[in-house]
Image (cartoon, helix red, strand yellow):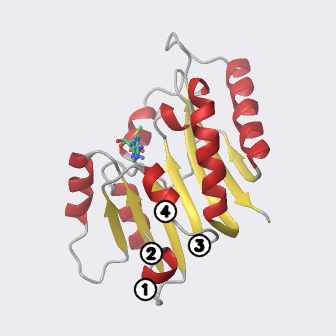
Amino acid sequence: MNTKQRLPFVYRELVFELGSGNGKMLFDLSNRNKNKDIFFIGIEIDRLQYEESCALTTSAASNILFVNDDIENVVTKLEDDTVNMFISILPHPTFIGSENVTKWKPFYIKMLRKMKDHGQFLLITECTNEFFSPVSIEEYKKWRNWITSSFIDMGYRILLALDDSPSGFSSYYLDQFKHDTNRIKVLTLLLEKIT
Ligand SMILES: C[S@@+](CC[C@H](N)C(=O)[O-])C[C@H]1O[C@@H](n2cnc3c(N)ncnc32)[C@H](O)[C@@H]1O
């Protein structure tokens, strides 16, 4: 996707959701943009969830699009310095797990290049342990330090860190995880690109 050529000029900002699941969260967000001057693109690799997302967007004048693809493919094809915001809610372990650091670090470094100066990355992710037992405060703090320093090392600036999900945000998995806060600790990071 060539974002400079294909983004309709009426849109002031471009927002991508990575792994948009059933699309509900992004659809709600697009409806909050009353001026319809932000264009939202959700990328989801799973065909069934992608189709569920498309069923939400019936209006021809919609400022939202869902794409059935791998986020690596889509992000790689974006032009540098074009994206206002990336959102990732509860990414798959391939894109956040400690066992996959060597895979996801190059991805997020590439993603940073695609963001405009002062562009943002909203990451909501979760801490669990290998036994899926309650996560202690110490365990959580150690994980939070590791994840925040990983993003700082990659060149992101931390604008906000919240030991919860942001209020007013709902997604299929976030809503499930809210029922098990002892074993699943959610962290929200708002990260910024500074050139
Ligand atoms: C834990 S779910 C979160 C879904 C949604 N954000 C939510 O909070 O309900 C992770 C999502 O990422 C999608 N996914 C995993 N790998 C992907 C990839 N390489 N490209 C695009 N989507 C991917 C999965 O199919 C799944 O829908």
Which comes sooner in the sequence, label 1 or label 2?
A: 1
> Mark number for residue 39?
2
Q: Please provide percent x and percent y for residue 44.
A: 35, 51
Q: Callout 3: 10 Å neighbours few (<14), some, many (20+)?
A: some
Q: Is mark 1 within 8 Å of ligand 1?
A: no
The CA span between labels 3 and 4 is 11 Å
Which comes sooner in the sequence, label 2 or label 3?
A: 2
In contact (CB < 8 Å): disc 4 and disc 2: no
Q: Please provide percent x and percent y for residue 163.
A: 65, 39
Q: Residue sitting at 73 percent across and 30 percent down?
A: 146
The CA span between labels 1 and 2 is 9 Å
Tell me if I can see residue 40 in this picture: yes
In contact (CB < 8 Å): disc 2 and disc 3: no
Camera-near label (1 vs 2) is 1
Looking at the rendered structure, the kind of residue marked 3 is: Thr
Q: Check disc 1 and report the residue beneath it.
A: 8
> Mark number for residue 82?
3
Which comes sooner in the sequence, label 3 or label 1?
A: 1
Q: In which quarter of the image is residue 63?
A: bottom left
In this view of the protein, which residue sits in the foreground, 59 or 44?
A: 44
Camera-near label (4 vs 1) is 4
Camera-near label (2 vs 3) is 3
> Mark number for residue 42?
none
Residue 28 higher or lower than 126, as above or below? below
Looking at the rendered structure, the kind of residue marked 2 is: Phe
In this view of the protein, which residue sits in the foreground, 125 or 48?
A: 48
The CA span between labels 4 and 1 is 18 Å
Report the quarter where the N terminus lies. bottom left
